[in-house]
Amino acid sequence: MLVKVLKTRKEMIAWRKACDANQRIGFVPTMGALHQGHLSLIKKSKRECDKTVVSIFVNPTQFGPQEDFKKYPRKHKKDLSLLKLEGVDCVWIPKSIKEVYPNEVETFVKARQSLCEMMEGLHRPGHFDGVVTVVAKLFQLVEPHRAYFGEKDFQQLKVIEAMVEDLFFLVKIRPCKIVREKSGLAMSSRNQYFSKDDRQAAAQLHEILRSADSIAKAKTALKKSDFNLEYLESWNEDLSKQTTASPCRWLVAARFKGVRLIDNIVR
Ligand code: AMP
C-alpha cells in the first residue's frame, strides 16, 4: 500500500475528522529530506499512538534572507518511500506555500522572548517566530494528542514547549534523543551539502564537545579544526540560566566548509 498523501488544508482536516474520537494521534512535523533522526521520531510516535501523521514543509518564514531556503534539499520521492516503510498513516505535503500562508499579511506568533535572546535566537533573528507560527498552524490542522520534536534542535524544542504552555495548546510535546551518524556527527538534512571527506571531518564537532575539559578549551579546539564558531555556551536544562555546573548542556553552532551545523550534549 502506498502512503496516503494529503496536499491541501481541506484534505488534512477531512482526514483528521474521520479519525475515531478515542484514537490517539501522533504528529511529526518535518522539512523533509528525511533521515534516521526523523525516522526515530516517527518510530516513537508509532509506539505511543494509534495513528501517526507526518508533515513535510520547508517553512519560508523561519529562514533569514541570506539563508538556504531556496537550496534546502527537497526529496519527496525518497521521503515517501521511507514513510511507506515506516507505515505512517498519512503525510501532509502542502501543494504550495499558499496552502499554509493563504493571505499576504497574516497573524504571526511571537516566540517567548526569554528563549530567543541568545544562541539561535540571536544569530537567526525572527527564526523562532517563524517556527512557532508554522507549528501553531500545523497543530490547528492536525489536532494531535502528541507531537514529536528532536533534541538536536534543543532551543527550538524549548521554544515550542513554551508556546504550547503559553497558548494553552492541549498537545503533549514529546522530546526525542539526537540520532548520530557512525562518526558522531548529528544527523541533519544539511549534511548532504558536504563532500564525503568533509562530512567525516565534521564529526570533530561532536568529538570536541564530548572530550574538551572546558568551554574555553573546546572553543580553541574547534577553531584549530577549521570550525567557524557562532556560539558555544553551557546552559541548564530549561535554558533559564547559563551554568557549567553538572548536569548542564553545551550548545553549539558552527560553520564547517560553509555548512551551518548545530549540536548539543549533556555534560
Ligand atoms: P527538520 O526537518 O530539520 O525541521 O527536523 C524535523 C524534526 O526532526 C525536528 O524536531 C528536529 O529536531 C528533528 N531532528 C532532526 N535531526 C535530528 C536528529 N539527528 N536526531 C533527532 N531528531 C532530529
Image (cartoon, rainbow, N blue to C red):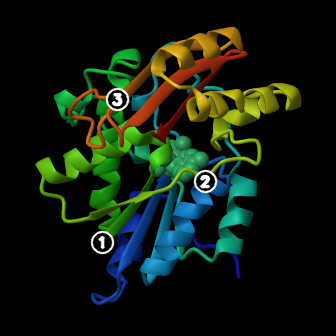
Q: Residue 10 at x, y = what percent?
A: 38, 64
For label 3, being within 8 Å of ligand 1 is answered: no
Q: What is the quadrant of the C terminus in the image? A: top left
Q: Earlier in the sequence, mark 3 or mark 1?
A: 1
Query: In the figure, 266 relative to 128: above or below?
Result: below
Using a 10 Å C-alpha cutoff, classify the residue at mark 3 as few (fewer than 14 neighbours), some (14 to 19) or many (20 or more). Answer: some
Identify the residue under disc 1. 145
Label placed on residue 37: 2
Q: Amino acid at mark 1?
A: His
Q: Earlier in the sequence, mark 1 or mark 2?
A: 2
Q: Is residue 253 visible?
A: yes
For label 2, being within 8 Å of ligand 1 is answered: yes
Label placed on residue 107: none
Using a 10 Å C-alpha cutoff, classify the residue at mark 2 as few (fewer than 14 neighbours), some (14 to 19) or many (20 or more). Answer: many
Q: Residue 152 at x, y = what percent?
A: 50, 43
Relative to 84, 196 lies left or right: right
Q: Amino acid at mark 3?
A: Thr
Task: For marks 1 and 2, give the CA distance.
Answer: 21 Å
Please name the residue shown 21% across and 45% down the image. Answer: 162
Q: Secondary structure at mark 3?
A: loop
Task: For marks 3 and 1, give the CA distance.
Answer: 35 Å
Identify the residue under disc 3. 244
Q: Secondary structure at mark 2?
A: helix
Q: Earlier in the sequence, mark 3 or mark 2?
A: 2
Q: Secondary structure at mark 1?
A: loop
Considering depth in this image, is 81 or 4 the residue closer to the camera? 81
Q: Is residue 95 visible?
A: no
Closer to us: mark 3 or mark 2? 3
Which quadrant of the figure has residue 187?
top right
Please name the residue shown 47% across and 71% down the image. Answer: 45
